[in-house]
Amino acid sequence: QVQLQQWGAGMLKPSETLSLTCDISGASLSGYFWSWIRQAPGKGLEWIGVINHSGSINYTPSLRSRVTISLDKSKNQFSLKLSSLTAADTAVYYCARGGGLFVGKENSHFDYWGQGTPVTVSS
Amino acid sequence: DIVMIQSPDSLAVSLGERANFSCRSSQNLLFKSNNQNSLAWYQQRPGQPPKLLISWSSTRQSGVPDRFSGSGSGTDFTFTISSVQAGDVAIYYCQQYYTPPFTFGQGTKLEI
């Protein structure tokens, strides 16, 4: 049974950096892509970026200058950092298994999701 | 970026009725090398993360009731609930994984 458990600070101020971690149980980092996705209040889903077991990454262009996704193989975890926060970054952030790096049949749907972390950016 | 447009924005049906959801992509999602469409459907209930129902346009995930189905190819896709149950109240999203950045439709809200 694959489970993703995520955690991180939920209340942040403008200009601060968001930091979230996703712990993977029931699966190895190897052979899969691991993504972060967010959902602003009352809005749809926005893909943030992806990492694979080798540490190769791809970010959505609109957030590329502020996003860092990394992994810790020893702990079977991957993480998200988003800097220079504004109120527009207020959202529920999800980790998920799936994604891809390029156009290709290796890309995959998001089959397992974390429970979500509500993040509020306010002064 | 590939734009995903869903219709309608909301859908009200009676219990036991059929519900049809439409999704259109701005680019062809068919991989000719494997003849598969990189299109998924998700169900999101309030306060919950999305749940994957359908992948590759028409492949139902394990444990998903067979009253949920998907079809379509290229740029036009349909998701159907053959007999709506009370527990199906949710927002349904389509999503392309043909190429990053991976994009979702705006969602269709199903009401009873």
Image (cartoon, grey):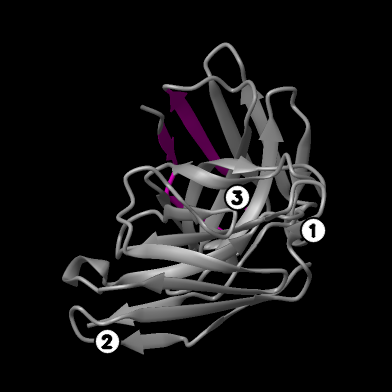
Residue receiving disc 3: A16
Residue A51 to residue B29: above or below: above
Which residue is at 22% across, 83% downward?
B112
Q: Earlier in the sequence, mark 1 or mark 3?
A: 3
- Chain of the residue under label 2: B
Amino acid type assigned to the residue bearing label 1 in the image: Pro
Classify 10 Å Cα crowding around label 3: few (below 14), some (14-19), many (20 and above).
Answer: few
Residue A6 to residue B12: above or below: above
Quarter where residue A73 is shown: top right
Q: Quadrant of the N terminus of chain B?
A: bottom right
Classify 10 Å Cα crowding around label 1: few (below 14), some (14-19), many (20 and above).
Answer: few
Q: B73 or A16: nearer the eye?
A: B73
Residue receiving disc 1: A61
Residue receiving disc 2: B13
Question: What's the CA distance linking mark 2 and mark 1?
Answer: 39 Å
What mark, if any, has residue B96 been given in the picture? none
Magenta span contains residue A8: yes
